[in-house]
Amino acid sequence: YYMSDSIERNISAMREEQRKLELAIRKLQELEKQQKQFIGNISHEFKTPLTAIKAYIELLSMYRDDPKLTDEAIESMGKETERLYEMVDKVLRLAALEKYDFEQQAETVRLDELLHDLGSRMRGKAAKFDLTLRVEAEPAAVWADRESLIHIFVNLIDNAIKYNAPGGTITVRARNRGSFAEIEVEDTGIGIPGEAQVNVFEPFYTVNKDRSRQSGGTGLGLPLAKRLTEAQGGTIELAASSAAGTLFRVRLPARERRSGRLE
Ligand code: ADP
């Protein structure tokens, strides 16, 4: 009786191990698929601006005496080049995260000061689009990589500017929640339709390709912001979005919780 009982237990333990292995294999296959898809997307997304630039160069070489066409071609090539630059920059940053050593980069960062600095730096850009940028930040210190924080919030504020409506506002709030700091970037813009909300953190995803491209978008801003936030032990979510605007929320471990990750 005892013997068969222990055999039974062994068998069920083995089954459990087998189940875990199968799960791990499936996860790896999924990751491999995502990686292949990412590389496929990169090739496609890089070729689009390059093809456009190539075509403009041909046009220019044929019609170099036409000043109107020359102006147009130069402006378009400038835009495409800028977008390509942004894309290369973001893909390289994503790749660099593979061997990113958070503890090496981390320091105590006064979040409120950082956000007020960013606010001052980006207020001019917001004003160009007839937008008001407000920063309401409680004193809060986080254990984080300053450069990554800047990227995360520049990306969120940039989007809040790009997808806003004239006369609108962007509000950046930071609150001290004890073990973590909570930062919200809220805009009064066009919003993200319900069915698109689950996809905005996927690489190269854009709701409206034209609007995104017009404003130099790459579809890599939010995926990069997400990976950077998670590398700091934090979380990022699309908290709310409607035709009245969008709210992104970031949570970062407070200064005291050096090695803790947020649940
Ligand atoms: P992009 O470079 O195209 O802005 P992101 O990864 O930053 O790429 O964002 C992905 C998509 O999510 C955008 O193309 C846009 O459609 C949507 N989006 C992001 N932020 C906002 C926002 N604040 N308001 C409305 N739509 C947004």
Image (cartoon, rainbow, N blue to C red):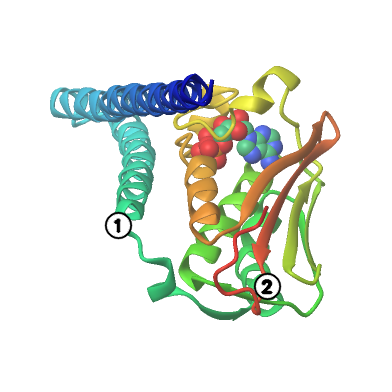
Going by the numbered disc 1, the residue's amino acid type is Lys
User: Can you give x and y, in whole percent of width and height, for residue 106 in the image?
Assistant: 47, 75
User: Seen from this angle, which residue lies furthest front?
Assistant: 1
Q: Nearer the viewer, residue 33 or 158?
A: 33
Q: Secondary structure at mark 1?
A: helix
Q: Is residue 40 above or below residue 161?
A: above
Q: In this view of the protein, can residue 163 be seen by the observer? A: no
Q: Quadrant of ligand 1?
A: top right
Q: Which residue is mark 2?
A: 254
Name the residue located 53 percent from the left edge and 53 percent from the top edge: 230
Name the residue located 61 percent from the left edge and 57 percent from the top edge: 234
Q: Nearer the viewer, residue 164 or 256?
A: 256
Q: Nearer the viewer, residue 155 or 174?
A: 174
Name the residue located 75 percent from the left edge and 61 percent from the top edge: 182
User: Can you give x and y, in whole percent of width and height, for residue 19 in the image?
Assistant: 45, 22
Tell me, for residue 99, which label it has, or none. Answer: 1
Question: Image check: 245 left or right of 198?
Answer: right
Name the residue located 48 percent from the left edge and 27 percent from the top edge: 6
Sequence-first tag of 2 and 1: 1
Q: Secondary structure at mark 2?
A: loop
Question: Image check: 157 left or right of 59?
Answer: right
Q: In this view of the protein, can residue 140 be seen by the observer? A: yes
